[in-house]
Image: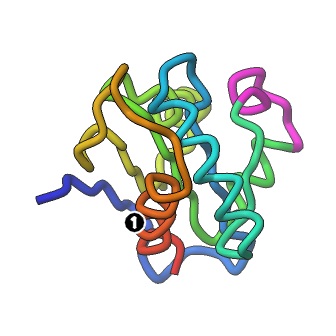
Amino acid sequence: MIPIQSNCGCSCSSGPKLIFSCSGAADVGELADRASRALTRNGSGKMFCLAGIGGRISGIVKSTEAAASILAIDGCALDCARKSLEEAGIVRVNHLRLTDLGFTKGDTEIDDETIAQVVDKAKLFLS
């Protein structure tokens, strides 16, 4: 069973579907980043700037607060993307952790197949 955190109900606004990704140095961070970019390209949501959240850039924080849904994709159990959002006061976050999907930090090949696996799981949070 995949642990899923979802705090967004039907009362969410009609804003965009935003995706925040771990882009860390490990292979699972790269996988999270590349899957987020693929989700943006296919129109499932819009990848947004996690660094802007960390820097408390007011426009980025306000746009995020107005989002219809927010997805944080983390590569590993450190949950940097989710925690960065929470530190900025954004708690209505759907969360996907790639190590919970069976990907192993330091031993994950990044290819079209692994990216597609993450994209398929992430779409469940963005529909």
- Which picture quadrant has residue 56? top right
Q: Which residue is mark 1?
A: 121
Frontmost residue, 52 versus 42: 42
Horizontal arrangement in the rendering, residue 29 relative to residue 98 (left or right): right
Q: Residue at x 68, y 54 (%)?
A: 65
Q: Residue at x 35, y 61 (%)?
A: 6
Asked if the stretch drawn in magenta spans residue 55, the answer is yes
Frontmost residue, 63 versus 105: 105
Asked if the stretch drawn in magenta spans residue 37, the answer is no
Q: Residue at x 51, y 81 (%)?
A: 127
In the image, what residue type sits under mark 1? Lys
114 lies above or below 55 = below
Frontmost residue, 24 versus 45: 24
15 lies above or below 62 = below
**Callout 1: 10 Å neighbours few (<14), some, many (20+)?**
few
Colouring convention used in this rendered image of the protein: rainbow
User: Which residue sits furthest left?
Assistant: 1
Quadrant where the N terminus sits is bottom left
62 lies above or below 106 = below
Horizontal arrangement in the rendering, residue 86 relative to residue 76 (left or right): right
Residue 35 placement (x, y as % from top left): 58, 53
- What kind of element bears circle 1? helix
Q: Residue at x 50, y 63 (%)?
A: 116
Horizontal arrangement in the rendering, residue 7 relative to residue 12 (left or right): left
Residue 69 placement (x, y as % from top left): 58, 67
Residue 86 placement (x, y as % from top left): 50, 34
- Which picture quadrant has residue 14? bottom right
Frontmost residue, 19 versus 75: 75
The magenta segment is 51-59
Horizontal arrangement in the rendering, residue 92 relative to residue 55 (left or right): left
Residue 52 placement (x, y as % from top left): 79, 31
